[in-house]
Image: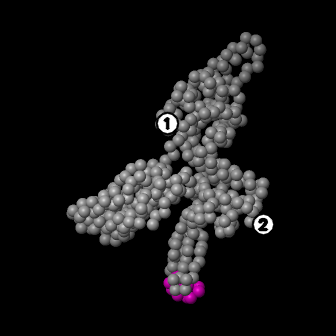
Amino acid sequence: MLEQQEEKKRTSFERYKLKQALEVLEKKKGFHTELVSLYIPPDRQISDVTNYLKQEYGTSSNIKSKSTRKNVMDAIQKLLALLKNVPKPPPTGLVIFCGAIPTNGQGTERMEMTTIVPPEPIKIYKYHCDNQFFLDPLKEMLVEKETYALIVIDRSEADFAILKGNHLEILKKITSGAPGKHHAGGQSQRRFERLIEQAGHEFFKRAGEYANELFLQIPDLKGLLIGGPGPSKDKFAESNYVDYRLKNAILGIVDISYTGSSGIDELIDKSKDILQNVRYSEEKSLVQKFLTMLVKDDSLVTYGEKQVRKALDQGAVDTLLLSEDLDILHVTISCPNCNYKEEVTIKKSELPPLEQKIQNKSCPKCTSSLLSIETIKPIIDELGELAERTGANVEVISSETEEGQQLKQAFGGIAALLRYSLNN
């Protein structure tokens, strides 16, 4: 029976698992319109769904192609058998994909079924039959819907960027070409001051035009942050250089020390309160917390697969940090003759040689030739699920931030904040 999930904020681990599942499903193709996608929203009665499927089962008996008819009817039967054990949809709904997937050309189809409890409620009820699965509603859940516009500006240059989820993109950099300070006295100095003032005005006007062009076209713009050293940013923000819609969207004017990409980073760091729910800021804060604790009290953090696994086994992990770029697999090797079991961790590129080695290897315990690979699981899934069973938070960290890159490169992409010291 499918367990009912309590409503909760979707986690980065849930998003990761959904993304991985969709990547697998997208590669599956049928020969004809025989792959079934079923979307059941949380408020739909299961009895209504089963009645509809029974009608579709009767209709599918009229399909001309014998193989297509059989595959569609088999898929519907599997759906009906599954739904017998589902009293009602989970709070976010239920999505089921079922169909005959070719393994090696026509005639080698194997019936496969995948169930997904989405991380947020689905709003459509849909039965869809095609030669590929219908994934668009679930893909939409992975799209970050809120975008923040960022401007870092002073009299000499302006940088424009957008922050969306865990992705930061620098869109444009412009420079003013304004003359520097003139130290001569009298009328000449006043004339140059006027020239500098006029050049600054023209530059701010041009920066405002770029801001309008870059940001007004964003339909899901959440707000605008403006930063810069000195008073220039305040003058730019408070005057009418940008369209009134952008001016009304200003969430903060922040004093920072730098311009350029370093200024963009500083603007984000100094706007943590505003951006606290943006994934980019969340990831930076999580890794920064780990690094701070590593320096302050390294007994409350650990890193590396072996050490983190030990902490997970003891239930000591509060938050598990996993790099999204990990290309490591957890492989279980077993012998059904004597129940011998061995677990190894390898890179994805090492899997084919291992499979070949196992084929030619006898069981080290009973010497039988039945030794085989039982399971292959990405290390993110394996450690993440272990962490969830112990009540730990699981955070999948991208490499979009400098901190995310540091987690991968310096700590092997696996780290943990602990509930208590393992040295006690």
Quarter-wise, where is residue 269 in the image? top right
Residue 410 location (% of width, % of height): 68, 58
Q: Is residue 370 magenta?
A: yes
The residue tagged with tag 2: helix, strand or loop?
loop
Residue 100 location (% of width, % of height): 35, 66
- Please report the residue visible at 59 percent of the width from the left and 65 percent of the height from the top: 389
Amino acid under label 1?
A: Ile
Drawn side of residue 72 relative to residue 397, left or right:
left
Crowd tier of the residue under label 1, counting other residues whose Cα lies within 10 Å: few below 14, some 14–19, many 20 or above: some
Q: Nearer the viewer, residue 412 or 360?
A: 412
Q: Which of 53 and 128 is in front in this view?
A: 53
Crowd tier of the residue under label 2, counting other residues whose Cα lies within 10 Å: few below 14, some 14–19, many 20 or above: few
Q: Name the residue under label 2.
A: 424
- Please report the residue visible at 60 percent of the width from the left and 70 percent of the height from the top: 345
User: Is there any visible trace of residue 151 in the rendered image?
Assistant: no
> Which numbered disc, 2 or 1, marks the residue that appears first in the sequence?
1
Q: Does the magenta stretch include residue 44?
A: no
- Please report the residue visible at 34 percent of the width from the left and 69 percent of the height from the top: 109
User: Is there any visible trace of residue 74 in the rendered image?
Assistant: yes
Q: Residue 218: give its label.
A: 1
Secondary structure of the magenta portion, mostly? loop
Report the span colored magenta: 360-371
